[in-house]
Image (spheres, helix red, strand yellow):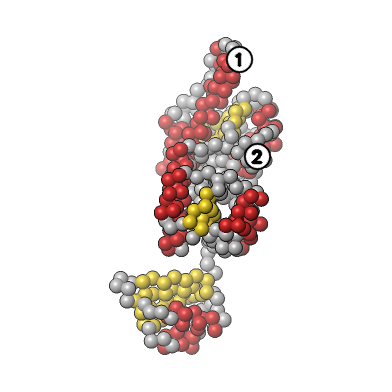
Amino acid sequence: MKLLVADTFESHGLDGLRQAGCDVIYEPKLEGDSLLDALARIVPAILVVRSTKVTAVMLSAAGELGLVVRAGAGVNTIDVPAASRRSIFVANCPGKNAVAVAELTFGLILALDRRIVDNTVDLRRGQWNKKDYSQARGLKDRTLGVIGMGQIGIAVAVRAHAFKMKVVAWSRSLTKDSATEAGVVRCESPAEVASKCDILSIHLAAAPGTKGIINGAVLNQLAPGSYVINTARSEVLDYDALLTAAKERQLRIGLDVYPNEPSASQGEFNTAIVKAGGVVYGTHHIGASTEQAQDAIAEETVRIVEAYLRTGQVLNCVNLRSKARARACLRVRHLNRPGVLAHILHEVSHAGINVEEMGNVICQGDESACAQILLEQPLDVDILSKIRTGNANVLGVTQSLL
């Protein structure tokens, strides 16, 4: 099975993909038209990408493509709705970069608090300014506000506790019990978090429900001189509102993500927020870029591909239907012989009823199996009888309503 890796990828991960049985084509600089051409030329069954954008046009060009693996956490660079329309599974590697992003988050927090970048720049210019730079607040007993308590948010909270900080948090999935377990104070909204913290750190995935969720109304709840950190996605933060708040509230800002980032790994970059004045530090969208994180992501990618090849199941799939529309479950116990499933599906098809999902589990000894088929509508008594009596290898038929 052909597998195209269109981004940089660890060598041991490539070896693992080959050992899984894939014909691996490694072209790590593909993007845009070059990726489109490669998909049409290579016709892979599996595509692995990191930050490269995968568009609807690209998905249409790859006629045999059945799985796209994002070797990272988010999938905002992949047109998931377009993939779903073409029955292409999309999987990711959630949580494997949590430690790396949490470490960068605290790197930015410490840099803002001690003005490490400005210290270094002045030293390189031959300027000594201990008087100004010796004035820092410190982190102990300050309050960190965490927006998004997934694996990255939890990792950030753990590190905040090591600095003897208080932590307040908001997340749609955060309950009182899970907040207590994580050692954080649960807030009812992002605005409440902002009103109670000294440092606001954002750790939300990009999704329709999170776009621009950290807006002017939230930022205006911050006390003057507060810090804002975004190592998540640019889409979740209103950067125009951040620019205004930075000037009006003298915010210190640490960023790893930006609107309109260059698609290439190198190039010119201009954005208003990094020129806002005051203390604004930034990195080049490198939150997950540690050797440890990339090794873990490579291992998870191999695990996803191995499972797909062996069982057809897609681990960490992001575009499966969350709730089946099936109204009946048909169970057929049968001898493990050729033609039984074809017989069952023939009768279901002639009844004009759609199969929503199905599976066939083999019993120990390989002599018998059980087919479980979720149906759009229940079968009538006559069809059930035809399934039961129409093939000598059928052992029993039951149907339950859902």
Q: Secondary structure at mark 2?
A: loop
Residue at (49%, 86%) from the top-left corner? 383
Residue shown at 52%/67% (left/top)?
324
Instruction: Say whether marks 1 and 2 touch (CB < 8 Å).
Output: no
In the figure, 102 relative to 351: above or below?
above
Q: What label sits on residue 223 in the rendered view? A: none
Question: Depth check: 221 or 120 in front?
Answer: 120
| Residue extending furthest toward the left | 365
Which residue is under mark 2?
262
Image x and y of residue 272, in percent: 70, 32
301 versus 194 height, above or below: below
**Which residue is more in the foreground, 220 or 253?**
253
Residue 230 can be seen, yes or no: no
Q: Position of residue 287 (x, y in %)?
A: 53, 37
Q: Which element type, helix, strand or loop, lies under badge 1?
A: loop
Residue 37 vertical position relative to residue 97 in the rendered view, above or below: below
Q: Quadrant of residue 354?
A: bottom right
Which numbered disc, 1 or 2, marks the residue that appears first in the sequence?
A: 1
Quarter-of-image position of residue 365: bottom left
Tell me the tag on residue 125: 1
Image-quadrant location for residue 367? bottom left
